[in-house]
């Protein structure tokens, strides 16, 4: 017995212009129609499973018909509601009333809007605190318009209103604003007063300062760019960075991308200070140790932090067009990262670099005294870095050193590590 009744075959025959179909013919056609339907539905289920879906759609049936070389069904994607009607003479048989559509009506109808494909697009929400005027961001006039509930209405292309939430300003308490202004004033005062030292202690210990971290990051990055000729200010800014890094109550990882360029600038900048007598060497040493501490502490959070740093330092070290002060900063930055960095980055390039440095070391005092001193500074930094690496390697083989020579080597290595500038003085 077929699940497709013979009455269904008779109704279908009437719809295609066969008013009276014999009963024996409809009874013979019903099993064949059922077989064809099962075959199509099995192919449609296969298409559904290959598409990694659990819901059968009209597209699956259409694909199954195409596989069987059958003309696909047209019009199944209509958005009109389905209207069921009862077949005449059959109280339990219903069918969908398909409205006949005139082709002229379809041709003259306006084209619908093309559906938008799903896509992911990236855009800048803000650049250095300034929101760019692009279509993806709220309009500038909406941001500047004062509203009580921080919401406004705009119209889309189709005329429908849409709500836009305005950005919320980062509001600081009056106490935190006064604290930030006082720290900034002491930092820019160019004097190491007891009050400034107390402020650094407060930055390194006090809790509740996390809302000020983005402001300090922007302040440090901006002032380092402006004050490259003011050595005391650069020293004060680096001490502020050191205090922020020491504070256990501050989550500073999201702001390292703003602080690292400032510290690297104080290491490999061509000129720091406006006088030739300025002790910019000490600032480069301090900043190198500061950057090395950041790599040791946050290297596991940002896996490419030390890689990017060493790439910058090696580029400054091996570029012959860079100044000797930049070479010195690069050597000190690599040396502060430890013996492994020295062994992998400095020692393989040492012989090539010495060919560049030797002519500068042999300059006569009358020709260019400042450049000669800079060359000896670089030479002393290289000597101390190589000595640090050698001492770490010799500690693995204590039998190679006599008991009397070991304390001397240890003391000399400590001097070289703590004060690399003394090495150049000894060599002179």
Image (tube, grey):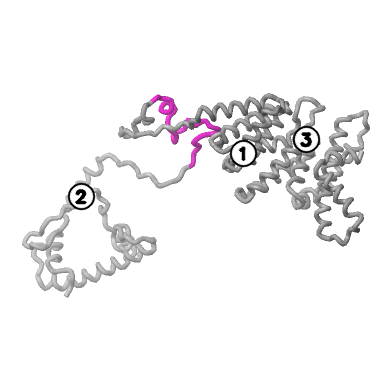
Question: Which quadrant of the view contains residue 49?
Answer: bottom left
Mark 3: give few (<14), some (14-19) or many (20+) Cα within 10 Å.
some
- Relative to 15, residue 220 above or below: above
Q: Nearer the viewer, mark 2 or mark 3?
A: 3
Task: Specify whether 264 is left or right of 86.
Answer: right
* Image position of 142 with respect to 286: above or below: above
Whether residue 307 can be seen here: no
Mark 1 vs mark 2: give the one in front: 1
| Viewer-proximal residue among 201 and 149 | 201
Asked if residue 138 lies in the magenta stretch, the reply is yes
* Residue 360 forms part of the magenta stretch: no
Q: Which residue is mark 1?
A: 205
Q: Callout 2: helix, strand or loop? A: loop
Q: Which residues are magenta?
A: 122-146
Q: Which residue is mark 2?
A: 81
* Local secondary structure at mark 3: helix
Q: Main secondary structure of the magenta part?
A: loop
Q: Residues within 10 Å of mark 2 (few under 14, many from 20)?
A: few
Query: From this viewpoint, which residue is outermost toward the bottom?
Result: 1
Return the residue at label 3.
Answer: 282
**Quadrant for the N terminus in the image:** bottom left
Identify the residue at image location x=21%, y=71%. 32
Q: Position of residue 67 (x, y in %)?
A: 34, 64
Upstream in sequence: badge 1 or badge 2 = 2
| Disc nearer the start of the sequence (3/1) | 1
Q: Would residue 278 be visible to someone looking at this image? A: yes
């Amino acid at each position: 017995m077929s699940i497709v009744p013979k009455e269904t075959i008779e109704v279908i025959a009437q719809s295609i212009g066969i008013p009276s179909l014999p009963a024996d013919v409809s009874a013979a056609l019903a099993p064949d129609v059922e077989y064809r339907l099962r075959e199509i539905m099995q192919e449609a289920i296969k298409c559904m499973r290959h598409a990694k879906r659990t819901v059968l759609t009209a597209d699956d049936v259409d694909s199954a018909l195409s596989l069987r070389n059958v003309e696909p069904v047209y019009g199944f994607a209509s958005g009109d509601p389905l209207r069921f009607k009862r077949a005449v003479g059959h109280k339990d048989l219903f069918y969908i009333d398909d409205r006949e559509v005139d082709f002229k009506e379809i041709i003259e109808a306006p084209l619908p809007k093309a559906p938008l494909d799903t896509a992911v697009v990236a855009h800048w929400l803000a650049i250095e605190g300034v929101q760019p005027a692009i279509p993806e961001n709220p309009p500038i006039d909406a941001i500047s318009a004062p509203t009580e509930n921080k919401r406004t209405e705009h119209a889309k292309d189709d005329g429908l209103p849409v709500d836009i939430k305005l950005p919320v300003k980062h509001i600081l308490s009056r106490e935190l604003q006064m604290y930030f202004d006082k720290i900034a004033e002491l930092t820019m005062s160019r004097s190491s007063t007891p009050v400034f030292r107390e402020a650094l202690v407060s930055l390194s210990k006090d809790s509740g300062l996390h809302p000020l971290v983005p402001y300090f990051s922007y302040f440090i990055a901006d002032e380092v760019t402006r004050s490259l000729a003011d050595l005391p200010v650069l020293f004060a800014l680096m001490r502020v960075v050191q205090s922020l890094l020491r504070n256990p109550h501050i989550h500073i990882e999201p702001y390292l991308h703003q602080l690292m360029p400032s510290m690297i600038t104080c290491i490999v900048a061509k000129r720091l200070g406006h006088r030739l007598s300025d002790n910019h060497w000490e600032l480069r040493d301090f900043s190198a140790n500061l950057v090395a501490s950041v790599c040791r502490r946050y290297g596991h959070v940002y896996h490419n932090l030390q890689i990017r740093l060493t790439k910058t330092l090696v580029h400054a070290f091996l570029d012959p067009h860079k100044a000797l002060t930049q070479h010195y900063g690069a050597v000190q930055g690599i040396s502060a990262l430890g013996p492994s960095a020295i062994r992998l980055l400095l020692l393989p390039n040492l012989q090539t670099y010495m060919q560049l440095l030797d002519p500068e070391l042999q300059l006569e005092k009358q020709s260019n005294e400042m450049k000669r001193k800079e060359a000896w500074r670089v030479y002393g930094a290289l000597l101390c870095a190589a000595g640090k690496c050698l001492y770490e390697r010799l500690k693995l083989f204590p039998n190679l050193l006599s008991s009397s020579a070991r304390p001397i080597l240890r003391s000399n290595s400590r001097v070289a590590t703590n004060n690399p500038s003394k090495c150049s003085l000894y060599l002179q």
